[in-house]
Image (cartoon, grey):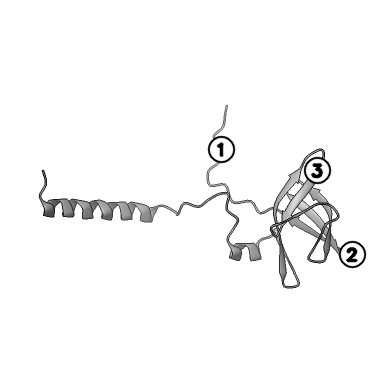
């Protein structure tokens, strides 16, 4: 077969090629993972209140129920979070009221890396 030095040389060449190919590709990320904390603090969907950031993670709207997850806490209309009262829950958006001030939280959606192929 191959001598030991030839196998070592071949393995080193393969590792080098693999590393070079991987350097050209962007890192693979989990599309279901929440955005990075630094992005959360500056995102349009996050509202800074006092020292707390209000971040809408998800909404659930059905004919019988409406709920949302804000700062990893499930809320419904009338719930209180960080001194604000949830007044409305819509698809991708939650409205809160604090001291007669209306606060609107919107979902932060990750960018689409590749558009879907046309079915037609």
Say what secondary structure mark 1 lies in.
Answer: loop
Mark before the other along the chain sequence, 2 or 3: 3
Say what secondary structure mark 2 lies in.
Answer: loop
Q: Residue furthest right?
A: 100
Instruction: Locate residue 42: give its quadrant.
Output: bottom right
> What distance separates the C-alpha of mark 2 from that of mark 1?
43 Å
- Is label 3 or label 1 in front? 3
> What distance separates the C-alpha of mark 3 from that of mark 1?
31 Å
> What distance separates the C-alpha of mark 2 from that of mark 3?
26 Å
- Is label 2 or label 1 in front? 2
| Count of numbered tags | 3
Mark before the other along the chain sequence, 3 or 1: 3
Say what secondary structure mark 3 lies in.
Answer: loop
**Would residue 38 appear left or right of 56 to someone viewing this image?**
left
Q: Who's the residue at 75% across and 57% down the image?
A: 105
Question: Pointer 2: residues within 10 angstroms few (<14), some, or many (20+)?
Answer: few
Q: Who's the residue at 72% across and 73% down the image?
A: 51
* Contact between labelled residues 1 and 2, with CB atoms less than 8 Å apart: no
Q: Position of residue 61 (x, y in %)?
A: 77, 43
Q: Position of residue 55 (x, y in %)?
A: 70, 60
The disc label shown at residue 46, or none: none
- The residue that label 3 is drawn on is 65
Q: Quadrant of the C terminus?
A: top right
Q: Position of residue 71 (x, y in %)?
A: 70, 60
Please tell me whether residue 20 is drawn above or below residue 60 in the rendered image: below
Q: Who's the residue at 36% across and 53% down the image?
A: 22
Instruction: Locate residue 45: give its quadrant.
Output: bottom right
The disc label shown at residue 116, or none: 1
The disc label shown at residue 100, or none: 2
């Amino acid at each position: 077969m191959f001598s030991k030095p030839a196998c070592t040389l071949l393995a080193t060449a393969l590792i080098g090629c693999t590393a070079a190919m991987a350097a050209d590709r962007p890192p693979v990320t989990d599309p279901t993972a929440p955005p990075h904390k630094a992005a959360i603090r500056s995102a349009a969907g996050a509202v800074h209140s006092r020292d707390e950031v209000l971040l809408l993670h998800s909404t659930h709207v059905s004919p019988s129920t409406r709920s949302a997850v804000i700062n990893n806490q499930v809320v419904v209309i009338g719930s209180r979070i960080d001194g604000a009262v949830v007044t409305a829950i819509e698809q991708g958006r939650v409205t809160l009221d604090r001291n007669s001030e209306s606060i609107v939280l919107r979902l932060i959606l990750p960018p689409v890396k590749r558009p879907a192929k046309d079915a037609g």
